[in-house]
Image (cartoon, grey):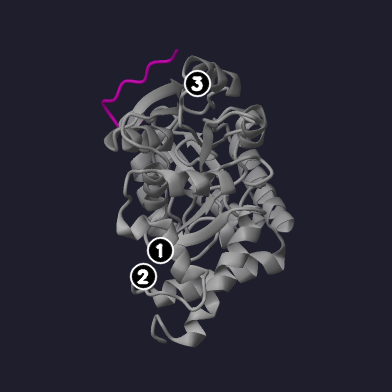
Amino acid sequence: MLGHLDPAFLALLPEIVAMLRAVYGLSEGVTLPLQATGMSGMEMGLLSLTEPGDVVIVANAGFFGNRIAQLAARHGARVVEVTSPWGEVVPPEALLEALDAHPEARLLAVVHAETSTGAQYPLEELGAALSGRETLLFADCVTSLATVALAVSEWGVDFAYSCTQKGLSAPPGMSPVAFSERGLRRARSCPRPVPFSFDIELLLDYWVKRPAAYHHTAPILQIYALHEALRCILVEGLEARWARHEAAGRHLRTALQERGLTLLANPAYQLPHITVVRVPEGIDGKRIQQRLLEEHGIEVGGGLGPHAPPMWRIGLMGVNASVEVAGRVIAAFDAVLADEHAHARSSLEEPGSIIREH
């Protein structure tokens, strides 16, 4: 490993910044990766752009919309939540109504790709509707960066954050963030001091300005991995990558629905790369997840949080976004569910059991 102030290593940092600009679709403003997980990006945005007492409007239709609301409240914001059931999205017009009722709102926050439900927010539509308003648009892009179309500058997003382990296919532990010029001005003028680790000016002195000013000991190997992951994305091409995620997800969803399984997300807002399936009645969803992992080497998520209905969350992201991988997932579900159904039938047919026909 090179040292974190080695000139050869420091030369990589502006390259990462330039590649992140391309992946985010950032034509003006700044972007860089924080040295912490995706949740740190959420927290940096809230601390950099709001003060205690500011109104923050949050679209809450899943676990991570709820997390934004919780963190905003934790940092002293007056949170206005606009909710929809899991699997739906909060209509843009409902958020605009909330903004009309609270024109002083500092931020309007949405989750572009709600990992907990498989629903995709119409972020471009909302950004266009907010044009000309003072309220900043804050977007969770943890699961949408490099998986679905995203153009933060063109769409009017003022702050976005993501992670490295999902669409980027790098190791976890970093959070790429993006500020618009307007968002950056707000951060620079915000009187509340932010934590040292989240100070955008100090971070830019290390990541962008040359000669670099020491800020922290950088995670060298994660940065090398992120550099390579971003390079691979741009070699493939963003539109080709988005199309690959769409094809893999469509193949998976079609096969699951042909088998009688029901999807959670409204089809009008279905994410291409996260398929959330309702666990059929009478099936132990956690047992299926355990068997998929132990017998087939496939990790499938379950519901997040106490309000989640029984579900399986299947992500085909980054290198796993292919029709071939989707086929492996389908075959594994076929094997495990067939065995579970056979076991259930044999239990009913044991001597002494009562079978009632309806």
Mark sitting on residue 215: 2
Mark sitting on residue 202: 1
Closer to us: 94 or 5: 5
Q: Do we see residue 34 in this rendering?
A: no
Q: Residue at x 45, y 40 (%)?
A: 312
In this view, 286 is above or below 292: above
Give, as a three-letter code, the residue at label 2: His
Q: Residues within 10 Å of mark 2 (few under 14, many from 20)?
A: some
Residue 300 percent location from the top left of the image: 44, 49
Location of mark 3 (residue): 103
Closer to us: 90 or 139: 139
Task: Please state the total of marks drawn on the protein image.
Answer: 3
In this view, 113 is above or below 213: above
Residue 256 percent location from the top left of the image: 58, 39
Q: Residue at x 31, y 34 (%)?
A: 52
Give, as a three-letter code, the residue at label 1: Leu
Q: Residue at x 46, y 72 (%)?
A: 223
Dot 1 and dot 2 residues touching (CB under 8 Å):
yes
